[in-house]
Image (cartoon, rainbow, N blue to C red):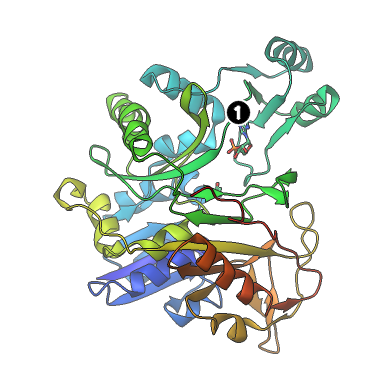
Amino acid sequence: MRVLVIGGGGREHALCLGLSRDPSVTEIVAAPGNPGIAAVARIVPLTTPLAVATDVAPDLVVIGPEAPLVAGAADELRAAGFAVFGPSAAAAALEGSKAFAKDVMIAAGVPTASHRVATTPAELAAALDATGPPYVVKHDELAAGKGVVVTADRDAALAHGAGHRAVVEEYLDGPEVSLFCLTDGATVVQLLPAQDFKRLGDGDVGPNTGGMGAYCPLPWLPPDVVDEVVKTIAVPTVEHMAARGTPFSGLLYVGLALTSDGPKVVEFNCRFGDPETQVVLELLDSPIGELLHAVATGRLADVGPLRWRDGAAVVVVVASEGYPADPVTGDVIDGVDDAASVDGVAVLHAGTALDAGGRLVTAGGRVLGVTATGVDIPAARSSAYDAVRRLRIRGSHYRTDIAAAVPS
Ligand code: AMP
Ligand code: GLY
């Protein structure tokens, strides 16, 4: 089958690599793609999702990022007769509106932090005082991972919420886990759990980012936790979305905190996580194209149990100078081939471009996701950092503690 992938970040590079290993996939087209994706896919400009799909005539369209999903790209493509992996705008509101997601969780009986919605400074102040520190304040809109502050400083919490419709939440304490659940609106099939490192700096300090690294699987996670999350969170959410007439089909990203009261939802996203996808898909042995096509055509129940490779995967994100506040672009990227020559390493492109002279340059905040597999997490980690050290990008930075302290 011919697959069209919409998007051009690290997640889409991982999806395209996975698709390239699926024998049922005969051609991959990516819009707008990136220079790394160009090694496995035909790159076309992203005019509009509908215009590209009409031109390419794919058997399956995979929509990677949340913005087109929230804007209704999947609805438009389905109406035109395409098989689409990705939820409708009404279902993508699980990510597009924190307040809507909270309403769904409450209606579905899904464990999550208690919350209040504030639209004025007075409501915000009252919500902060009712909740108490540490304060969690989220903008009620898409914000690429940057709409949330967690702070003990009441003034900073007030300042973050000012001028936005804000959701103030109870603080959830405990390790975070990302669990990706494929669903066609009825059947739910979970992938391996992963852990993401959201803060900019070593030791989990500094601002939240889109994610600075990840690893998979989680050797410390008791196996029954995943089953519990599927049963108490993913399935009730999918059932509730179907019952309210807005079935969710695509990938339900369940972001969890494992609290002393059990797993609770920190956030839902309506698409594969970035950079967790880079590690989860490295370990997936089942053909991803067939899986995504089964989701898109409502046949997920027919897919047998997923197969996974042994071992572990680690991704370290290399970011450009100034990320996340103000990323500098246009810096030359050297050393990619050397980094990719490390055993078990794939250098996945996120914010990269070719300049007028054909040189690879930075074109976004998160530039590369250096992904490595190994027999275990320490082995994968060591290969990933070996590769990262071979890259030369002026002003770039990365965390040095991704997957460093993983209990076994
Ligand atoms: P979100 O965009 O909702 O995923 O939030 C980004 C990050 O902020 C999460 O990954 C957590 O690290 C942190 N966060 C969000 N909500 C909470 C919460 N209720 N309690 C503690 N930390 C949170
Ligand atoms: N890595 C977090 C996200 O994709 O939202």
In percent of the image, x 37 and y 33: which residue is there? 229
Q: Is residue 354 above or below residue 122?
A: below
What SS does tag 1 mark? Answer: loop
User: Could one spot residue 299 in this view of the protein?
Assistant: yes
Q: Quadrant of residue 390?
A: bottom right
Q: Is residue 208 left or right of residue 233?
A: right
Q: Is residue 172 above or below residue 2?
A: above
User: Could one spot residue 9 in this view of the protein?
Assistant: no
Number of numbered discs = 1
Q: Quadrant of residue 98?
A: top right
Q: Is residue 303 left or right of residue 159?
A: left
Q: How packed is label 1: few (under 14 Cα within 10 Å), some, or many (20 or more)?
A: few
In percent of the image, x 46 and y 47: which residue is there? 69
Q: Is residue 115 above or below residue 253?
A: above
Mark 1 CB lies closer than 8 A to ligand 1: yes
Q: Residue furthest bottom?
A: 357
